[in-house]
């Protein structure tokens, strides 16, 4: 059995809750027959850590960009004497200026947004550029099913003009949206599960471009997703699996329509869940990613793995 060392933040800075890194990746490699140790990046004593890693002797080391300083990157580079080192970068476009500093110290960069040409220009070999889609992680993202669905929910930051959009939605169209910030992930899932719809806006924090957010592979597992037009969303869903909108007027019209057409609403709810479990899990992505990292990895039957390990939640 091959070994993996997974280095990430374990907690959010703002409150006592699991990190986004763990939310999206925890428990995945174990189901694929790797032995895994998780290390909190904030609690590394480099004087003793190297020996601990050498004793464990991992084949692969995965780490996230946690705003590391360059000297820390050099420390990470020493780990390459033991196992192959891969950086997982979740916000490639916004944080490219940091990501490129890692290029001399890693065996590959796993990312969601691209920028292949820029990476090559800055010295990263093309075979070290590993782009994947967002993937639903059944180890952390599932929640007990609820039939009591009402209202519209939005979670996450209110940057990118979202605060103003929600105010206009209320004042101009009389549509209320429940908003939460700084709550733990268990609470987020409960809100999602109890909501009839959940909003996903796509404008970035700098108001310069639209971005595909990771919540696109969370929301449809729980409620119907109302998504502002976003790049590449068609790679995840078709028009029968979520509700797309260009502006608040269209959003308002579609909410009213589906509120008055329950059967059509339920079809989208069903289709969205089916799309999550049928093609949008992290295991579907691992089937594409791991053969590029581990020559011995054989693609798995994702459907059978999901049915065997998540039978209380699996949806088809």
Image: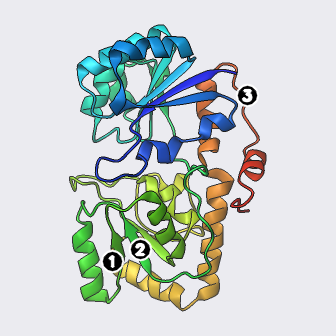
Image height check: is 110 above or below 197? above
Q: Position of residue 123 (x, y in %)?
A: 34, 17
Residue 227: image quadrant is: bottom left
Question: How far apart are labels 1 and 2 at the CA level?
Answer: 15 Å
Q: Quadrant of the C terminus?
A: bottom right
Disc 2 crowd rating (10 Å Cα; few below 14, some 14-19, many 20+) is many
- Residue at image position (54%, 92%) is 260
Circle 1 is placed at which residue position? 248
Q: Residue at x 26, y 73 (%)?
A: 165
Element at label 3: loop
Q: Which residue is mark 3?
A: 298
The secondary structure type at the circle numbered 1 is: helix
Residue placed under numbered mark 2 in the picture:
153
Q: Nearer the viewer, residue 43 or 108?
A: 43
Residue situated in front as seen by the camera: 167 or 254: 167
**Place of residue 158 in the rendered image (x, y in percent of width and height, measured from the top left):** 26, 64
Question: Tag 2 or tag 3, which sits nearer the N-term?
Answer: 2
Element under disc 2? strand
Badge 3 crowding class, 10 Å Cα cut-off, few under 14, some 14 to 19, many 20 or more, is: few
Which numbered disc, 1 or 2, marks the residue that appears first in the sequence? 2
């Amino acid at each position: 059995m091959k070994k993996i060392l997974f280095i990430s933040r374990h907690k959010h800075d703002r409150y006592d809750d699991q990190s986004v890194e763990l939310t999206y990746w925890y428990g995945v490699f174990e189901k694929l027959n790797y032995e895994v140790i998780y290390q909190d990046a904030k609690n590394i004593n480099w004087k003793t850590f190297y020996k601990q890693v050498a004793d464990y002797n991992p084949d692969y080391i995965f780490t996230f960009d946690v705003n590391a300083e360059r000297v820390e990157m050099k420390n990470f580079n020493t780990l390459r004497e033991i196992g192959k080192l891969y950086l997982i970068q979740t916000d490639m476009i916004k944080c490219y200026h940091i990501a490129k500093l890692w290029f001399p110290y890693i065996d590959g960069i796993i990312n969601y947004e691209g920028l292949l040409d820029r990476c090559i220009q800055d010295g990263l070999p093309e075979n070290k550029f590993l782009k994947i889609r967002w993937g639903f992680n059944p180890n952390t993202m599932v929640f007990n099913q609820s039939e009591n669905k009402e209202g519209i929910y939005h979670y996450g930051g209110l940057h990118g003009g979202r605060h103003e959009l929600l105010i206009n939605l209320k004042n101009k169209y009389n549509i209320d949206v429940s908003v939460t910030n700084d709550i733990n992930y268990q609470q987020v899932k409960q809100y999602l599960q109890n909501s009839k719809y959940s909003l996903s806006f796509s404008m970035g924090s700098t108001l310069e471009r639209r971005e595909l957010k990771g919540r696109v592979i969370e929301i449809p597992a729980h409620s119907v997703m109302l998504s502002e037009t976003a790049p590449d969303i068609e790679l995840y869903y078709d028009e029968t699996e979520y509700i797309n909108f260009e502006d608040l007027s269209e959003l308002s019209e579609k909410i009213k329509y589906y509120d008055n057409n329950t059967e059509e609403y339920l079809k989208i709810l069903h289709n969205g869940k089916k799309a999550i479990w049928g093609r949008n899990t992290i295991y579907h992505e691992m089937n594409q990613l791991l053969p590029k990292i581990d020559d011995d990895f054989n693609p798995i039957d994702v459907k059978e793995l999901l049915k065997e390990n998540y039978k209380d939640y699996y949806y088809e």
